[in-house]
């Protein structure tokens, strides 16, 4: 069965997943690489063209060899030097890795690049693309031979909870026993949904944003019945912000946010 | 139950950062060796980060941090569990005198198979030309079917001027790159369960057999040997080695009689395939030089006997090298 992620279970029992890159993204990465090779070849050609002054024959030989070495060596050199990345792969956040999670070896890099000649048949990587499409791990023939896969390596930024939560009065915190009950009743999935909604709030259309937070607030309001003083006059989005603040475990629930802010500032100053 | 996420991050982040710094250093300097203390620390950090990941996965409420930790663990896992030898330095002379010939001998059966397929093609090409002379147009590369061998020999030997004047180097470079590309293709076709490799080797054999028979039948054996031997005794074995590498891939792919999974089988031959690839490329560079600078010159410029003697010495040295070097 085809999967979008390669799941590896370590001997310690830890499971981690690597997101596999699909044939279309890889095709675009290859296209960027093709342009890079073209630019490199023409640059080298211009520089080496000066040899013509000495000998047209030698210049011809050097250009022929130069083109060959660049076209074959581009992938090998960059994937080895940049640990599985070329210019195209870097730009599109892709990386070649060992299919079993081990360290990428030089012979794997060479093998997968030498086998491009078959993957490219009959043109535009048709064979490679079809094999990749059918393969469970999204591998072209070169990847199968080299036992490699291409994974996505998006830049991972941790959510800035301080920016989301700190500095706003949280009326729910005035009722510590109810806040504790809320923490108890909210499942990890529900907490994650609320947090993601806040993080991505600016990506929604205004009407969808209002509708989403309305539904979420209705859902969380049903979990614990806070007194009207704590919830009246609070917009749905602010209510969710308060819920996330409570659920994500600020320790001094009774004391509001001021002490918590100070604690965070302290840890930041300590370089954590 | 929800863990105190912020506190958890604050307490564990220094561990993750230290692990990341060690990984960056390891990745930037693949040849660096860690001390015992560093190794112990690295392992400890890996286990701490793995435990953090396990905790986050259990509670699964913060996907981005989990993704970050997964990528960190994935990188560290490769460094810790890798059992294959780390290539610290390349020693070209040792590689040439030991690694390449030893690898060749280790898989010599695949080479014999490659040779047998080519010889079968030669026999087919020879018979085809003998029984149906019109088949020359199909069996021979373009140009060879246009002229009788004796006519060509006459032309070559009466040539007053050097056809390759001013373009010998370019011609040599063209031969090298073209032959290496064909050889890489022969190797790569091993991934078609060897069918493509076998077809290419057989086709090469047909062309060689057809041309050889044509010249021998026309009484031009000396010319043929003088023309082909200086570069052919290197070029043909190089293509056979490419076939050997392709068949190695194919055998690993088919995996007849082997219980190991596909990935393990291919991993087992990968390094040898690469060694053989660099080997045939090296041989073809030499063959390209000889073909452009010697093979294209015939009597009276270069005596055939000298060219045949040169080819014979090359072949003997190649056999000696592949058969004995590094034992």
Image (spheres, rainbow, N blue to C red):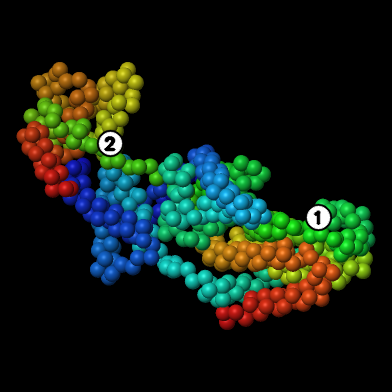
Q: How many marks?
A: 2
Question: Is B180 left or right of B24, judged from the image as shown?
Answer: right
Same subunit: marks 2 and 1:
no
Question: Residue B86: image x %, image y %?
Answer: 42, 67
**Quarter of the image where the N terminus of chain B is located:** top left
Q: Residue at x 20, y 43 (%)?
A: B5
* Helix, strand or loop under label 2: helix
Residue in the foreground of this view, choosing between B12 and A174: B12
Where residue A192 is drawn, which disc sits there? Answer: 2
Question: Is A232 left or right of B242, judged from the image as shown?
Answer: left
Residue A132: image quadrant is top right
Q: Residue at x 90, y 62 (%)?
A: B154
Residue A91: image quadrant is top left
Question: Residue A167: image x %, image y %?
Answer: 13, 30
Residue A158: image quadrant is top left
Badge nearest the viewer, 2 or 1: 1
Q: Chain of mark 2?
A: A
| Residue linked to disc 1 | B141
Question: Is B54 left or right of B295, judged from the image as shown?
Answer: left
Where residue B292 is drawn, which disc sits there? Answer: none
Residue in the foreground of this view, choosing between B312 and B23: B312
Q: Is residue A218 above or below residue A70?
A: above
Q: CA distance from mark 2 to mark 1?
A: 68 Å
Neighbour tally class for label 1: few under 14, some 14-19, many 20 plus, Cα within 10 Å = some
Q: Residue at x 56, y 46 (%)?
A: A46
Q: Residue at x 92, y 54 (%)?
A: B134
């Amino acid at each position: 069965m085809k999967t979008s992620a390669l799941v590896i279970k370590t001997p310690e029992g830890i499971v981690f997943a690597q997101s596999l890159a699909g044939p279309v993204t890889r095709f675009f990465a290859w296209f960027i690489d093709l342009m890079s090779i073209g630019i490199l070849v023409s640059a080298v050609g211009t520089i080496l063209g000066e040899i013509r002054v000495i000998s047209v024959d030698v210049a011809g030989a050097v250009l022929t060899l130069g083109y060959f070495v660049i076209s074959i060596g581009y992938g090998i050199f960059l994937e080895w030097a940049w640990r599985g990345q070329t210019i195209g792969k870097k730009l599109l956040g892709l990386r070649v890795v060992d299919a079993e999670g081990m360290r990428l070896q030089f012979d794997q890099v060479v093998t997968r690049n030498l086998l491009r000649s078959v993957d490219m048949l009959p043109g535009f990587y048709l064979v490679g693309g079809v094999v990749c499409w059918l393969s469970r791990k999204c591998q072209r023939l070169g990847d199968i031979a080299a036992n490699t896969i291409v994974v996505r390596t998006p830049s991972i930024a941790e959510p800035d909870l301080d920016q989301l939560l700190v500095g706003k009065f949280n009326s729910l915190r005035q009722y510590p026993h109810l806040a504790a009950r809320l923490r108890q009743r909210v499942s990890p999935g529900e907490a994650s949904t609320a947090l993601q909604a806040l993080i991505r709030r600016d990506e929604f259309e205004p009407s969808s944003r209002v509708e989403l937070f309305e539904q979420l607030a209705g859902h969380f309001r049903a979990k614990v019945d806070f007194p009207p003083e704590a919830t009246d006059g609070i917009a749905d989005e602010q209510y969710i912000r308060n819920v996330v603040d409570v659920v994500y475990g600020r320790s001094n629930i009774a004391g509001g946010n001021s002490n918590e802010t100070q604690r965070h500032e302290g840890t930041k100053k300590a370089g954590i | 139950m929800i863990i105190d996420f912020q506190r958890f991050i604050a307490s564990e982040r220094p561990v993750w950062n230290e692990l990341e710094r060690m990984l960056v250093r390891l990745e930037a300097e693949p040849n660096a060796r860690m001390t015992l203390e560093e190794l112990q620390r690295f392992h400890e950090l890996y286990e701490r980060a793995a435990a953090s990941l396990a905790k986050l996965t259990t509670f699964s409420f913060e996907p981005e941090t989990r993704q970050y930790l997964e990528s960190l663990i994935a990188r560290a896992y490769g460094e810790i569990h890798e059992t294959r030898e780390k290539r610290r330095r390349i020693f070209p002379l040792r590689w040439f005198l030991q690694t390449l010939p030893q690898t060749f001998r280790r898989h010599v059966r695949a080479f014999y198979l490659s040779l047998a397929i080519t010889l079968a093609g030669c026999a087919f090409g020879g018979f085809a030309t003998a029984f149906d002379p019109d088949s020359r147009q199909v069996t021979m590369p373009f140009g060879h079917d246009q002229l009788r061998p004796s006519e060509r020999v006459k032309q070559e030997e009466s040539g007053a001027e050097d056809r390759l004047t001013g373009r010998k180097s370019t011609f040599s470079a063209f031969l090298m790159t073209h032959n290496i590309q064909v050889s890489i293709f022969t190797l790569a076709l091993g991934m078609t369960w060897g069918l493509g490799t076998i077809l290419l080797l057989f086709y090469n054999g047909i062309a060689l057999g057809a041309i050889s028979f044509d010249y021998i039948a026309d009484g031009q054996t000396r010319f043929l040997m003088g023309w082909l031997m200086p570069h052919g005794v290197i070029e043909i074995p190089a293509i056979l080695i490419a076939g050997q590498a392709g068949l190695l891939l194919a055998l690993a792919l088919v995996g007849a009689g082997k219980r190991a999974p596909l990935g393990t089988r291919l991993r087992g031959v990968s390094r040898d395939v690469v060694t053989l690839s660099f080997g045939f490329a090296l041989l073809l560079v030499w063959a390209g030089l000889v073909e452009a600078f010697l093979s294209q010159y015939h009597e009276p410029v270069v005596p055939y006997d000298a060219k045949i003697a040169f080819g014979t010495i090359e072949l003997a040295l190649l056999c000696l090298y592949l058969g004995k070097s590094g034992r």
